[in-house]
Structures are given as structure tokens and as C-alpha cells.
């Protein structure tokens, strides 16, 4: 324990000049005699540094204690050691900078040195067998298929009771579908009742027709007579009645005016007379009172006559004018309606009768159709074969899965559709869709090879039977292929897929090159060329050679004209390469 403490104390109490001496020794030892590319110490430097480190414990303990007591005093030797240390560090930095500059100069020299030219990619023309096969997705198609449609004339409610399962083998006459006939029977009964009612309505209309015709004629005659009388009333009113009523109103006003004057005059005379005679006062009062009442009554009668006269002239007569005129207008309208009824209502009644007769005919026709639709409540197989749900489209039954879930008891089927297809198992053909781009390459009687989808099966021979003369869809032609029945496995059925390989081109000695060796002319894209190389002179520039193209397969294309066996062509774009060389300043 004492040794460990002493060792730590010695290490921590190194004198400043000893520490500087060690640093200087270490720096001088690291300095190389000649410039080097690496700043790592040499083996000699490492030995010197090791010896200096090993010399640290050799310091005297007394000297350490003395130096420890005089820490603030610095000897000349310690200052000299620090100066040497600084000089060594500066020299080391200068050498490091020289090394970096040397590296940069060396890199620049390497960049300016000439690079080896890349070897041109070429292709040597050698005739080869060029065979192009067109692969089509085909589907096996039965040559004989009988569709089972449901095309009712008027009925639409077909609820399933029984149905033949998908894929079942059936014989002609077996039941495929059985529907619930309850509703259609009720509809037929309702229609028969409606027909009976319609027949009764027709009989009634036929019997009512003569009466209607006679009534309409009488109404027309009454309307004519009413119009004539209205005109006569108007004339009599304007010529006689109206002037007389106006004259009477004026005369009565005048009459009551005279009566008032008479009563007033008489009252005045009585008053004068009674003043002069010797009659008693009671008699006088009675006579005068009676006369005064007569005057008052005459005044009231005159006032009433004025009101009546004013009402007659300004209210009643204008209203009577309008009433007489309206009566005449109404009579004219009634006459026009009666005449129209005579000509139209009778015709309409005849048309309605005819319409009822036609409705009866339609009802009878509908009745006949419903009876025929009732026969569809049970559909039987039209031929022997296998049950496929739905209609065959391009060799497949796209709705089979949907219809299988739909063809269940209590579900309804839609009329006007193909419910099933009865497929004869043999013989089979193949149907495929041909792109318009490949249409010229496929012709009738062309041999084909057929690959089945199952693994480890032999290919089957066949031939092109027909190609549709017009597209069956956008840019697609329907193609039918015959199959060698003897080579066809028993498990192959209509609807299975296959691959049909048609050899559209076969040439034993074809001149082909990679497609990237062929370039399009910049002015005329219909022209094509290659860069032909001189195999005897490597420094010779490639020469343009126009070529005529043929068939292509994968990354290769046939040269029908312009090249021959042994020619070597460039696989690079020489124009772009020439531009790059000019940009780099090459000749």
C-alpha cells in the first residue's frame, strides 16, 4: 500500500523542467530526417519515448520535495525546455502541411494522365434459326350446346321450387326447373272475371247508343230554340220594356212632386181659412194635423220616388241590360255545346265502345299468353348433356358462381334470360381471342400445338378452323381451333383453359441482330440503319449501313436486307459517341 501511494506521489510531483524535457524529447524523437507521407512515429522514436517514460521514476525524492516547496520559482532550464517543445510542435505542423500538399499534387497528376479508351461493344452477324410462336389463351368449347331460355310473354314471377344441380348429367325430358304456379293461376282467374265484366259493359254500350243519339238531337233542338227566344227577349227589352221602365221611374218622381205641392197648398189654405172663420179650436187642430200629416207623407213619398227612380235608372236597368245580354250569350254557348255534343259525344261514345272491344281482344290475348307462360312453370331438358348455369360467352360461363347461389328454392329468376346450357361432352373445340396486330399471321388450316393447364400432360395437336371476318370486340377477332379428339384426355371438359401456340414465322437461316444495334433515321423514321465496323482496321470509323427490317423476337430483330454473315456492327450509338469525343477535344 505504501508503494502505491509513493508511486502516485512521484508521478504527480514531476518538476516543470522534467515535464518539459520529456515533451521536448518526445517531439524531437517524432521528427523525421526526410519528408514523409505519414505522420506516424518511426521505430526509433518509439524507443526514445519509451526510455523517457521509463526515466520518470528516477527523479530524487529530495529534489521533488524541494521543487514542491518552490512551485512559484521557475529555473532557466525549465523555460528552455518549453521553448524547445514549442519549436518541435511548429516543425511537426509544417511537415504535415507539406505532406498534404504533396498528396494533392500527386492526385492532380493522376487526373491528367491519359485514361485507357473503353472497348466498343460489337456484334458479329451469324445466321440462326428464327422461329416465332404466337401464344393465345384459349378455352375449350363444346361443339354442341343447347341453351335453356326463360322468355315468358307476360308473366314475371317465377319462384323456384326445384332446380337441377350444376354439373349434373341429364337426359332429354328430365325436369330442370319447377316453379310455383299459385300466383299465375290466380292471375288467370282474375283476368277471366275481368273479361266477363267487359263483355257486359260492351253489351250495355251497344244498347245505349241509339238513346244517346236521340237525346243529343233533342238537346240540340232545345238549345236552338232557347237562343231564338233569348234574341227575341233582347229585342223586346230594348224596344219596349226598358224605355217604359225608365219613363215610369221618371213619371213617378214627377207625380210625387205634384202631390207634395198639392198637400202644401191645401195646408196653407186651411191655415188662412181657419184664421178667419168661427170654428172651434179643436176642430181646427184636427183638420190642420191631418193636413200636416198628409204633407209629411207626400214629402216622404217624393223622397222615396227619387231613390226608386235613381235606382231604376242607374242600377236596375244596367243590371237588366247585362242579364239580358248574358242570357243571350249563354243561349249561344248552349246551342254550340249541343251541336258539338251531337257531333262529338256520339262519336266519342262510339270510340269508347270500340275501345272496350279492343280491350276485350287484348285481354283475350293476355289470357292466351298467361296460359302459355303457365306451361313454363316446369322446364324440361331439351337434350342430353351436362348442366351449366347461365350462357356461354367465349367458351366460359362467367355467371355460373352467381347463379349457383341464386338458384335456390323460394328465390325468383329473371325472365328474358338464359337459365342454363345443356352441353354435349364431346366433341370439343377451342375458342381464343386474336389481337388485330396478329390477324394477318393466322389463317385457316394452320397447325397449332395445345398445352393443357395441368402439369405433366402432353401437348395436343390441332389446327385453325376459322377466324371471324370482323372484330367481335375492340381490336379482337374470334378464333376457333379444331382439336384431335383421340389425343384429348377424358377429364378435359368445356370451360377449361389452355394455351394455343401458333407458329407464325419459321426461318432456318435468318440474319438477326440485337434491337439496340438498329437506329431510326432522324429525317425519315421509316428508314433504319446500323453502324458497320471494319474488322481489318480497328481505327477505322464505323460506317452507316441502311437495312430492311423483318420479324422481331424478344431483344432481336431480323435484317432482311443490308447485312450478311460475318458483318460486325456496333451496339452503341455512334452519333452520341462522336459528339462526346468532339466535346473532349478528340480528333
Image (cartoon, helix red, strand yellow):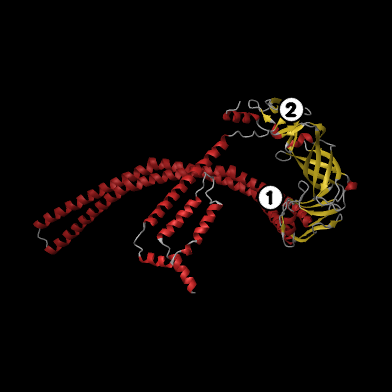
Taking the image as shown, residue 411 lies to the left or right of residue 169, namely: left
Q: Of the two numbered discs 2 and 1 on the same chain, state the one appearing first in sequence.
A: 1
Q: Nearer the viewer, mark 2 or mark 1?
A: 2
Q: What residue is shown with label 1?
A: 359
Residue 488 horizontal/vertical position (percent): 87, 48
At a point 59% along the width and 43% down the height, the residue shown is: 344
Reply above or below: 577 against 13.
above
Q: Tag on residue 503?
A: none
- Which quadrant of the figure has residue 476? top right
Give how far across and how far down residue 281 sits, in percent: 11, 63
Residue 289 or residue 337, whichever sits in front: 337
Percent from the top left, x then y, of residue 342? 58, 43
Q: Nearer the viewer, residue 418 or 58?
A: 58
Which residue extends farthest right?
486
Pick whichever, 32 or 535, lies toward us. 32
Quarter of the image containing the C terminus? top right
Instruction: Please indicate, yes or no, whether residue 225 appears anywhere in the rendered image.
Output: no
Q: Secondary structure at mark 2?
A: loop
Residue 507 rendering spot, x and y as whole percentages:
82, 33
Total marks drawn? Answer: 2
Q: Is residue 20 left or right of residue 379?
A: left
Asked if residue 212 shows in the view, the reply is yes
Residue beneath disc 2:
535
Callout 1 secondary element? helix
Amino acid at each position: 500500500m505504501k508503494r502505491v501511494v509513493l508511486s502516485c506521489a512521484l508521478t504527480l510531483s514531476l518538476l516543470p523542467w522534467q515535464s518539459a524535457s520529456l515533451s521536448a524529447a518526445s517531439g524531437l524523437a517524432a521528427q523525421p530526417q526526410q519528408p514523409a507521407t505519414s505522420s506516424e512515429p518511426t521505430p526509433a522514436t518509439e524507443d526514445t519515448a519509451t526510455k523517457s517514460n521509463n526515466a520518470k521514476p528516477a527523479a530524487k525524492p529530495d529534489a521533488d520535495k524541494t521543487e514542491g516547496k518552490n512551485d512559484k520559482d521557475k529555473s532557466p532550464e525549465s523555460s528552455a525546455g518549453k521553448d524547445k517543445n514549442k519549436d518541435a510542435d511548429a516543425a511537426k505542423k509544417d511537415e504535415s502541411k507539406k505532406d498534404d500538399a504533396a498528396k494533392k499534387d500527386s492526385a492532380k497528376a493522376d487526373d491528367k494522365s491519359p485514361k485507357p479508351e473503353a472497348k466498343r461493344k460489337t456484334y458479329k452477324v451469324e445466321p440462326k434459326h428464327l422461329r416465332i410462336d404466337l401464344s393465345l389463351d384459349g378455352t375449350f368449347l363444346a361443339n354442341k350446346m343447347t341453351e335453356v331460355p326463360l322468355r315468358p310473354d307476360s308473366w314475371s314471377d317465377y319462384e323456384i321450387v326445384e332446380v337441377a344441380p350444376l354439373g349434373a348429367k341429364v337426359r332429354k325430358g328430365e325436369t330442370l326447373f319447377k316453379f310455383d304456379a299459385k300466383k299465375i293461376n290466380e292471375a288467370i282467374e282474375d283476368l277471366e272475371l275481368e273479361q266477363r265484366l267487359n263483355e257486359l259493359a260492351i253489351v250495355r254500350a251497344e244498347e245505349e247508343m241509339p238513346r244517346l243519339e236521340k237525346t243529343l238531337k233533342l238537346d240540340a233542338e232545345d238549345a236552338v230554340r232557347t237562343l231564338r227566344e233569348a234574341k227575341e227577349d233582347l229585342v223586346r227589352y230594348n224596344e219596349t220594356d226598358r224605355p217604359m221602365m225608365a219613363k215610369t221611374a221618371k213619371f213617378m218622381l214627377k207625380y210625387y212632386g205634384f202631390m207634395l205641392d198639392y198637400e202644401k197648398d191645401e195646408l196653407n189654405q186651411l191655415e188662412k181659412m181657419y184664421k178667419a172663420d168661427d170654428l172651434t179650436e179643436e176642430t181646427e187642430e184636427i183638420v190642420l194635423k191631418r193636413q200636416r200629416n198628409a204633407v209629411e207623407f207626400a214629402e216622404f213619398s217624393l223622397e222615396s220616388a227619387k231613390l226608386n227612380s235613381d235606382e231604376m235608372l242607374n242600377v236596375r236597368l244596367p243590371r237588366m241590360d247585362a242579364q239580358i245580354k248574358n242570357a243571350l250569350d249563354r243561349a249561344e254557348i248552349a246551342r254550340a255545346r249541343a251541336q258539338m255534343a251531337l257531333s262529338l259525344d256520339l262519336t266519342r261514345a262510339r270510340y269508347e265502345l270500340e275501345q272496350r272491344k279492343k280491350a276485350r281482344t287484348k285481354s283475350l290475348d293476355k289470357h292466351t299468353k298467361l296460359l302459355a307462360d303457365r306451361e313454363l312453370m316446369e322446364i324440361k331438358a331439351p337434350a342430353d348433356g351436362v348442366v351449366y348455369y347461365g350462357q356461354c360467352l367465349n367458351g366460359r360461363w362467367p355467371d355460373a358462381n352467381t347463379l349457383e347461389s341464386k338458384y335456390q328454392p323460394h328465390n325468383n329468376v329473371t325472365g328474358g334470360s338464359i337459365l342454363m346450357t345443356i352441353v354435349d361432352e364431346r366433341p370439343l373445340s377451342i375458342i381464343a381471342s386474336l389481337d388485330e396486330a396478329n390477324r394477318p399471321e393466322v389463317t385457316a388450316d394452320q397447325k397449332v400445338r395445345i398445352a393443357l393447364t395441368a402439369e405433366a400432360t402432353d401437348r395436343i395437336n390441332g389446327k385453325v378452323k376459322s377466324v371471324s371476318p370482323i372484330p367481335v370486340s375492340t381490336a379482337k377477332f374470334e378464333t376457333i381451333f379444331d382439336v384431335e379428339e383421340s389425343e384429348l384426355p377424358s377429364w378435359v371438359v368445356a370451360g377449361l383453359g389452355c394455351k394455343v401456340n401458333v407458329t407464325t414465322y419459321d426461318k432456318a437461316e435468318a440474319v438477326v441482330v440485337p434491337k439496340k444495334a438498329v437506329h431510326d433515321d432522324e429525317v425519315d423514321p421509316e428508314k433504319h440503319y446500323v453502324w458497320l465496323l471494319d474488322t481489318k482496321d480497328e481505327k477505322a470509323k464505323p460506317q452507316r449501313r441502311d437495312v430492311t427490317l423483318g420479324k422481331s423476337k424478344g431483344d432481336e430483330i431480323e435484317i432482311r436486307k443490308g447485312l450478311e454473315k460475318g458483318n460486325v456492327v456496333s451496339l452503341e450509338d455512334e452519333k452520341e459517341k462522336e459528339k462526346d469525343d468532339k466535346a473532349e477535344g478528340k480528333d
